[in-house]
Image (spheres, grey):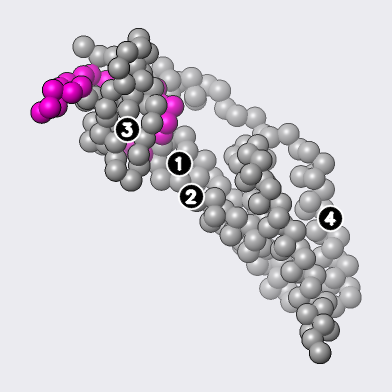
Amino acid sequence: MRFDGHLKSWNDERGFGFIEPVQGGQEIFIHIKAFPAGTGRPAVGQALSFEVELNAQGKKRAKAVQYPVTARKTKAQRPEAPAPWTLPRVAAIPLFVLVYAYVSRQWPVSPVVPVLYLLASLVAFMAYALDKSAALAGRWRVSERMLHALGLACGWPGALLAQQMLRHKSSKPSFLAVYWTTVGVNIAGFVVYHAQLLAALRP
């Protein structure tokens, strides 16, 4: 007999968690081996269909776990719209272009710099896309620390476009606070480096 439920908790390091049955009652233990092969890492909140068996100690555990087909169809039919463009998001890249133009008029800027920003932005965009895909499929995620590091290393324009176009990491306050900090630090570093302010401050 099959039952329906949702993955209530999951310990990714130890490879087990607990299912909350739709019909209520005792939570059911589930091990990573009960999931279909090649379906990625489980994610809390996923809808599951499963059978129940007793382990050697006589306790219930899930087996033959499946992902309900209806849940997958619902996700496919409801693509997410791009995140709303707020004033800071609209103005960030154009303002940086103005800062870049001003700095390049005042001091020499290597032609490698715009290439660096472009390549870093492409890498950052792909990292966000991979993390978005992993989140939906329940696979290993790209760490927030890595996403912030890519933004700090000149990839923040691509990260901003990814947040908007993929609607990923665009509404988490704690993440956005660090993200905008990396944007400010990167732009300040760009200006300071080319203006040679650090050299001027040395005795």
Residue located beneath label 3 in the image: 17
The residue positioned 68% from the left and 35% from the top of the image is: 83
Mark 3: amino acid: Gly
* Camera-nearest label, 3 or 1: 3
Mark 2: amino acid: Val
Tell me which label, 3 or 1, sits earlier in the chain.
3
Tell me which label, 1 or 4, sits earlier in the chain.
4
Residue located beneath label 1 in the image: 134
Residue located beneath label 4 in the image: 95
Tell me which label, 3 or 2, sits earlier in the chain.
3
- Span highlighted in magenta in the image: 38-60
* Camera-nearest label, 2 or 4: 2
- The prevailing secondary structure element of the residues shown in magenta is loop
Left or right: 132, with 102 as reference point = left
Q: Residue 4's spot in the image, x, y percent?
A: 33, 15
| Quadrant in which the C terminus appears | bottom right
The residue positioned 61% from the left and 61% from the top of the image is: 120
- As helix, strand or loop, the secondary structure at mark 3 comes to strand
For the residues bearing labels 2 and 4, Cβ distance under 8 angstroms: no
